[in-house]
Amino acid sequence: MEAPTNSDETAATETEITQSMETCDKIDPGVKENHSSVDTTSNESLKIEDNSSEKKETDSQNEKIDEDGDNVPSETVTFKLVYMKKNYDITFELDAKISQLKQKIQSLTDVPPAMQKLMYKGLVKDEQTLRESKVTKGAKMMMIGSTLKDVLTVTTTPTASGVPIQETAGTTKEPLSRQKLHKKVLDKGKPEDIMPGIKNKKEPLPNFPISGMFNKSGGKVRLTFKLELDQLWLGTKERTEKLKMESIKKVVSEPIDGHEEYHILALQLGPTEASRYWIYWVPAQYVDSIKDAVLGKWQSFF
């Protein structure tokens, strides 16, 4: 038997290689299909992970909106409103504006917002918030104002006879500044430390005492309004009287003849004119605000 030659071995090797390649070609489509399936599954897994990540991010954003949104309760303050000798307990948002508070007050008192004057350490403005006005728990805020019904009643009430009274030259009263009782005080002249007066102008009460005025005996007197206490402090050199607003029955005033930027003003502390406490050289711009603060509502004065 002849031994195989080198050429025969080479041919056999080439045949084996060819058969191996054909076998691989038959297997490749399945392998490719499996690879394709694996790739698709991987892509879908990545998409799910991406969607899950986006959902988590969205949920996180929603939670943040909830934390910063309207569901978070606002900070409130409870205080007392004093009006017409009555106290109203009010709880309101600290960051709400005074104009919004006035709507709430209208529901309690029937006083329209346009006719309300709110005072707490001075006149508070509509555009301020309660926080900016420094309203604290238990504080007392005073309101001056009238219902529309009150205003209409005052302006349409007839006299006892049903006929309006018309003053004639014979019934006209002598001006206060010319009456002997007051003239002797005015003749002393204007106090040196009197506050400047402005006629034909109305200003809110200042945040400091109105001082430098005279009383009937010629002594110095000052007025300090403690609106949070519903009190008027009447101060002299000797003492300070702390008057409750409700104890003052009437406020009377009249310009000083020749010095219309100042008034003579009286606080009536009892039922008769004999109880009037007279004050001289009151700056005219504060007279209406004094009447409003003491009497607590709009009305005609004489």
Image (spheres, rainbow, N blue to C red):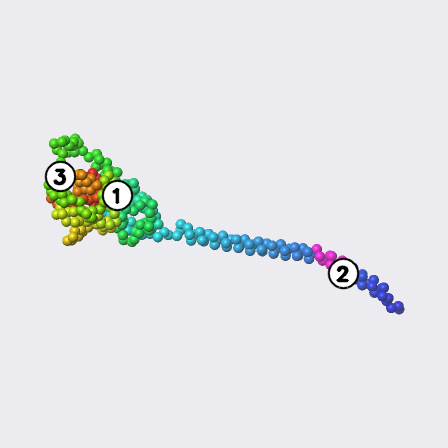
Q: Residue 243: in sight, yes or no?
A: no
Mark number displayed over residue 178 = 3
- Report the mark closest to the observer, 2 or 1: 1
Which residue is depicted at the point 27% across and 48% down? 122
Q: What kind of element bears circle 1?
A: loop
Q: Amino acid at mark 1?
A: Glu
Residue 141 belongs to magenta span = no
Q: What kind of element bears circle 2?
A: helix
Q: Amino acid at mark 3?
A: Arg
Viewer-closest of 212 and 269? 212
Which residue is depicted at the point 31% across and 50% down? 133
Task: Report, in whole angstroms, how far the alpha carbon at label 2 lies from the one at label 1.
Answer: 111 Å
Q: Quadrant of residue 167?
A: top left
Which residue is depicted at the point 63% across and 57% down? 38
Which residue does the numbered mark 2 point to in the structure image? 20
Query: Tag 3 or tag 1, which sits nearer the N-term?
Result: 3
Which residue does the numbered mark 1 point to in the structure image? 203
Compared to residue 43, the image places residue 109 above or below, namely above
Q: For the C terminus, give its image quadrant.
A: top left
Direction from residue 98 to residue 167 in the image, left or right: left
Q: Which residues are magenta?
A: 20-29
- Residue 273 lies, in percent from the top left, at 12, 42
Query: Tag 1 or tag 2, which sits nearer the N-term?
Result: 2
Residue at the extreme right of the image, as rendered: 1
Query: Tag 2 or tag 3, which sits nearer the N-term?
Result: 2
- Report the mark closest to the observer, 3 or 2: 3
- Residue 43 lies, in percent from the top left, at 60, 54
